[in-house]
């Protein structure tokens, strides 16, 4: 017996030595996402089977949560003891060198798996790494290679937002997603529960919200828009929609809690409220209703009573310290002619109509704070004075990538449209399901750095979040397709230190992860193996006599689509599939530019490309005129083009050009479309 104990001790020591000298390159074969901050692979493996024991020193609520989580696994453990030395997994609360509550240390030898953490969250994440390391031969057995892992997250907020208003996803799908998200150490589920597309949560005090505004006449939003955005009752013919009962919410919150995911509910206000106005029209401004307004009346005290009543029931259901009120994209012009809003402005000494929203936001912030909660809002809440306690979710690049919020001392969650909007196309749009606006491939997501440059307190950057808006995501399969693998990239950005990141290595691991999701979890992720990639024409400079020449703007470009500003149209580069970024330049209905060739130049062709994504407000011009001049005053028209747009086409890049033989110094390209919203987007004026 004594010899056996000695030999086991020697064997364990040898394993530890082998682990310490195993090269890091072996990580590539282990498929762990997010990449651990420190891992050393060893030789040998631990065999998890039906006789494997589990011991933990967890107590109280954390033990209850762990027990609930373990019940969801296919493995069935027998109860172990602290002194067990063989075929045992130990989950131990022990102080680590870091104080991070999500940190863990994982040690795997042939005899035992030991996971240590400062808190239950760390033990949970250690289990996720252990599971990703392992190879399952049957649902209830697994071989786990020997390794030592020391790991902790970079950011405290690693989030995923799902919009269930535009298209509804049932309780089972939400639970399925929570399971997958937690597997990749995502710790926040931002639940966009209400919006213009439908109200999705039971509110006892306002039953009409679900009786009258949880179902609509069409599933497809374009068809619904044609039908004047009519809501209907559940039993109406063709009714589409649904909502979560309070019991549903309680079950989902309990499941999320056991998986160490915090659910942040979003109740959008004061804009995006057509659903509310349909159910309770008295909350609209004077002479407004659900057909011509999306905004609550800020002059009406009933609005505040409604919002506070709803938030009280929301806080009863969700333990999250954060409550999201939206606050984005309100049409502030709605309030300017309302007598109640005018009266509110007079009473509160508000001089600008737009500042009514700041008044509203501040009241909501104070109300939530009184109840021990912290308000989150989209970055529009910065338009005015707001409590520094409010957290800003930064989504608009024109708001300096969160810089304004950081300069004002707000905590910020980085979620820019340029990198984190999962409803955008992730591959060549000609072969993709319908998307919104632009092109955000996996590599672009992965290369995002959420920590802005500048002099500010870096602890204010709470983390990163991927958002799935569902205007064009009608099915579960489509939601899974758009979410993965880009959410794995978000997970790695949020967890792994930037110096350890490498896209090629990540892509290899993502390929294995997609196989796992398809084969083991019955998900429908994007097929990364058949990725087409960027627009070929955008990968190398184009031949252009106008390259580097000055562009005079007779009409301004849209600052929201500035491209590379004055250099955009003659920098020698064509645009990619994405209208955002530095390649495409937008004009709100009137593109009128003159290129100065500096000297009279022989010209054989003048042309330009336009990006057409009508669902994203990126339109073709209706008319184009190409003309030339030698003095910059008198112009000769070379060609007029009338354009008819086919709105059944969801994405296309069109080129409009003149060809001939001329000599001129100045080239004018004038393209127009009478619009009040959206842009015509051009990438380059090509002269040959």
Image (cartoon, rainbow, N blue to C red):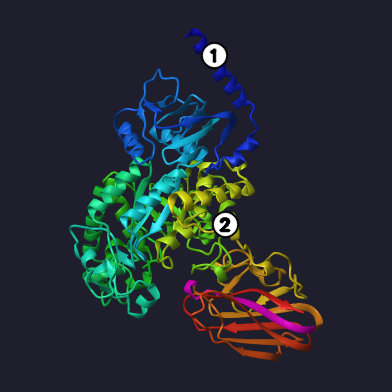
Q: How many marks?
A: 2
Residue 205 in the image: x percent, y percent? 18, 58
Residue drawn at point x = 63 percent, y = 83 percent: 670
Residue sitting nearer the eye, 181 or 266:
181
Instruction: Identify the main secondary structure in magenta.
Output: strand
Residue 523 in the image: x percent, y percent? 45, 55
Residue drawn at point x = 32 percent, y = 34 percent: 67
Q: Is residue 111 magenta?
A: no
Q: Nearer the viewer, mark 1 or mark 2?
A: 1
Residue 326 in the image: x percent, y percent? 37, 58
- Residue at image mark 1: 7
Quick one: SS at disc 1?
A: helix
Q: Is residue 673 left or right of residue 224?
A: right
- Residue at image mark 2: 528
Q: Is residue 149 left or right of residue 181?
A: right
Residue stretch rendered in magenta on the structure: 603-616
Taking 95 as reference, is 570 above or below it? Answer: below
How many C-alpha atoms fall within 10 Å of the one at disc 2: few (<14), some, or many (≥20)?
some
Residue drawn at point x = 35 percent, y = 71 percent: 219
Q: Earlier in the sequence, mark 1 or mark 2?
A: 1
Q: Residue furthest top?
A: 2
Residue sitting nearer the eye, 152 or 34:
34
Taking 317 as reference, is 542 above or below it? Answer: below
Residue sitting nearer the eye, 264 or 255:
255
Quick one: SS at disc 2?
A: helix
Question: Quadrant location of the C terminus?
Answer: bottom right
How much space separates mark 1 and mark 2, taking CA atoms?
A: 48 Å
């Amino acid at each position: 017996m004594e010899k056996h104990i000695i030999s086991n001790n020697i064997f364990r020591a040898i394993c530890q030595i082998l682990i310490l000298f195993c090269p890091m390159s072996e990580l590539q074969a282990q498929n762990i996402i997010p990449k651990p901050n420190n891992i050393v692979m060893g030789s040998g493996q631990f065999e998890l089977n039906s006789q494997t024991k589990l011991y933990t020193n967890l107590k109280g609520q954390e033990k209850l949560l762990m027990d609930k989580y373990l019940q969801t696994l296919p493995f069935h453990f027998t109860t172990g003891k602290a002194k067990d030395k063989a075929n045992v997994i130990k989950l131990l609360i022990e102080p680590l060198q870091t104080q991070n509550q999500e940190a863990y240390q994982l040690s795997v030898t042939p005899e035992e798996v030991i996971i240590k953490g400062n808190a239950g969250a760390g033990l949970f994440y250690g289990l996720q790494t252990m599971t990703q390391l392992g190879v399952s031969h049957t649902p209830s057995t697994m071989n786990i290679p020997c390794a030592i892992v020391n790991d902790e997250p970079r950011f405290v907020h690693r989030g995923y937002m799902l919009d269930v208003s535009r298209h509804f996803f049932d309780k089972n799908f939400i639970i399925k997603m929570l399971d997958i998200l937690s597997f990749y150490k995502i710790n926040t589920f931002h639940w966009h529960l209400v919006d213009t597309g439908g109200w999705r949560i039971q509110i006892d005090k306002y039953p009409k919200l679900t009786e009258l505004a949880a179902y609509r006449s069409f599933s497809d939003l374009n068809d619904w828009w044609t039908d004047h955005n009519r809501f209907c009752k559940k039993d109406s013919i063709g009714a589409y929609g649904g909502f979560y009962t309070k019991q549903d919410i309680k079950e989902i919150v309990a499941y999320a809690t056991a998986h160490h995911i915090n659910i942040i509910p979003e109740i959008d206000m004061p804009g995006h409220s057509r659903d509310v106005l349909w159910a309770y029209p008295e909350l609209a401004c004077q002479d407004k209703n659900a057909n011509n307004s999306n905004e609550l009346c800020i002059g009406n005290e009933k609005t505040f009573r409604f919002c506070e009543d709803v938030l009280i029931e929301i806080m009863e259901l969700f333990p999250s310290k954060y409550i999201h009120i939206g606050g984005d994209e309100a049409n502030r012009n709605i309030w300017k002619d309302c007598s109640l809003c005018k009266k509110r402005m007079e009473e509160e000494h508000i001089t600008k109509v737009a500042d009514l929203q700041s008044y509203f936001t501040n009241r909501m912030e104070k109300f939530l704070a009184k109840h021990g909660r912290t308000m989150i809002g989209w970055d529009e809440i910065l338009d005015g004075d707001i409590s520094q306690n409010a957290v800003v979710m930064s989504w608009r690049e024109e708001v300096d990538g969160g810089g304004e919020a950081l300069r004002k001392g707000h905590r910020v969650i980085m979620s820019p449209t340029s990198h984190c909007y999962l409803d955008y196309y992730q591959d060549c749009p000609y072969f993709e399901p319908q998307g919104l606006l632009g092109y955000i491939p996996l590599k672009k997501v992965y290369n995002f750095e959420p920590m802005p440059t500048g002099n500010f307190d870096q602890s204010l950057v709470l983390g990163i979040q991927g958002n799935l808006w569902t205007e064009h995501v009608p099915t579960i399969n489509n939601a899974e397709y758009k979410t993965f693998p880009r959410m794995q990239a978000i997970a790695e950005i949020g967890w792994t230190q930037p110096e350890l990141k490498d896209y090629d290595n990540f892509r290899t691991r993502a390929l294995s992860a997609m196989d796992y999701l398809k084969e083991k979890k019955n998900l429908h992720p994007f097929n990364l193996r058949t990725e087409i990639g960027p627009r070929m024409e955008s990968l190398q400079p184009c031949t252009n006599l106008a390259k580097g020449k000055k562009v005079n703007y007779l009409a301004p470009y849209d600052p929201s689509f500035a491209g590379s500003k004055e250099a955009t149209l003659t920098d020698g580069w064509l645009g990619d599939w994405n209208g955002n970024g530095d390649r495409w330049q937008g004009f709100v209905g009137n593109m009128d530019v003159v290129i100065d060739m500096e000297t009279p130049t022989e010209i054989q062709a003048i042309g330009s490309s336009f990006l057409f994504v009508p669902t994203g407000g990126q339109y073709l011009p209706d008319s184009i005129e190409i003309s030339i001049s030698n003095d910059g005053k008198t112009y000769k028209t070379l060609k007029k083009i009338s354009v008819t747009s086919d709105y059944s086409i969801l994405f296309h890049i069109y080129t409009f050009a003149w060809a001939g033989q001329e000599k001129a110094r100045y080239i004018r390209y004038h393209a127009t479309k009478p619009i009040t919203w959206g842009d015509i987007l051009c990438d380059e004026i090509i002269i040959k």
